[in-house]
Image (cartoon, grey):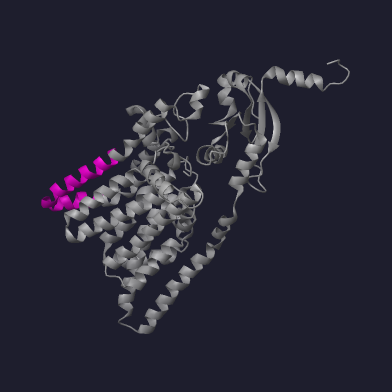
Amino acid sequence: MNTVPFILGLAHPTGYPSEILLGWLFSHLWMIGEVSYRLALLNAIEVAAASSLLCGLAVAERVDGFVAMLGALAFAVTFPVWAHATHTDVFGLAIVLVSLTLVLVRQWWRTNASGALFLAALVAGAALGTQGAALLYLASPMALIVVRSIRHPRLIRSSAVALGIAIGTGVLVYSYMPIRASFVVDRRLDPTLSLGLPPGRPFWDWGDPRTAESLLTVVSGAQVAAPRALSSLASPERLATSALFGWRELADAAGTPVLVSLLLLALCARDWRLTLFLTAPALAVTAFIANFPAESDPLRYYILPLWGIYSAAALGVADVLARLKRVTKTSLTVVYLACAVLIAFKAYSGRALFVQRSDHLGFSYIHDVIEGTTSDSIIIAPWTYATPIAYAAYVQRALGSRVLVPGDAADMAGYMKAWLSRGRVYAISESVPSSRAFVAMYRRAFNVIPNSSHDPKLYELRMPEEKTTARRRLIPGKGT
């Protein structure tokens, strides 16, 4: 995601068109620093905006401004939130747009103002273009709108208009994908097309969504079995396992589950409907993530649920304070100090995040790849090790005439003869690439993860007969 937005490419499922379009605009308008820095900055701004919305929601609920600020800070310095806010991540925009939707729907809930509902629908449509999980997060406000419309028929018309706005906005955002895919293929912007590979490769044109079928495959996440995980929401036999998984993830994310639970109970005693509205995103996403093995970072799915939980917790604190005012002012001071200590502890726990500023392993890896390959070669690399090279190729324009092919060398066996006839071919892999179509000659290792056994190595690929000749030359006394 440091590469695709800058080049207006197409990302992996579910496509993230809203993130790509905003990232392209910001990275080209904000001209200070590396593109990776600009997009990380954009992500930080998005999460900071979500924190501000938390404060705004609390103030709108007549919470003291200082307590509202404490709630926003407690959310912002919770480790998963802070960690994902300080590097480019597809969840940043989803968090701020969904949280804004919740704030606007809550305003409509209180006032019945159609303008707030229509604006919420517009924001929700854009949120759907950020991340597939946004649909789960938005289930809470959608359910509220449906229930209120049934109970108050006069609201049905405005609710129907809002639904149309949300769907229209979502369709408009996702229309970027087939339009851009057609442009990329027609103009042959993806260098891998010159190697005889079909359209649909990562970075420029993932999944080739030029047809309705291929677009649906990418948007639905079918390539990574997301629909199967989504179906688990209607699976009663998995409910207990999913609930246990969700509690563990939330407890790990929040860091202070007992205190947060007590504050939620305090708010629930006063207004269970509002408590459910704010905490429902955690319930909706849990069953999905618990049954989605393709996700290697489940904690980030709980950032938006944490926003709702800390919003509810701030309201719970306000309710506790309102009760303590009847006792003594000293009690208020104790609660304020306890909240401040909690935030300070959370901030101290995340101090290791500042080390990221001196992490240059990505750039050193790019330098080593360039040093170890010829300027007109083909470089085959699996996804993990291809992404920094793609940044060098398409953002920094530092690879010269080298062509990056994301994937495994063994899967490219059918193209190998033609590629080797036009120049050198290299493969980056943790183990020796194997195929009858080529032999792999070790060249060097990259120390991208210190003290790890997963460091990749660079191999030069050659035709099989070249290896036989080379071995004979190394055998003494054979006259060859």
- Secondary structure mostly seen in the magenta stretch: helix
Residue 84, image x, y percentages: 47, 53
Residue 242 belongs to the span the image colors magenta: no
Along the line of sight, the residue nearer the viewer: 169 or 309? 169
Residue 193, image x, y percentages: 48, 25
Along the line of sight, the residue nearer the viewer: 150 or 15? 15
Q: Is residue 282 visible?
A: no
Q: Is residue 438 visible?
A: yes
> Which quarter of the image is occupied by the C terminus?
top right
Q: Residue at x 65, y 33 (%)?
A: 373
Extreme residue toward the top, this view? 479
Q: Which quadrant holds residue 472?
A: top right
First to last magenta residue range: 142-171
Tally of marks: 0
In the visual, does 274 lie left or right of 154? right
Q: Which quadrant holds residue 426?
A: top right
Q: Residue at x 65, y 22 (%)?
A: 438
Q: Residue at x 47, y 56 (%)?
A: 80
Residue 240, image x, y percentages: 40, 48
In the rendered image, the vertical position of residue 393 relative to residue 441, given as above or below: below
In the rendered image, the vertical position of residue 274 relative to residue 457, given as above or below: below
In the rendered image, the vertical position of residue 201 relative to residue 2, given as above or below: above
Along the line of sight, the residue nearer the viewer: 190 or 231? 190
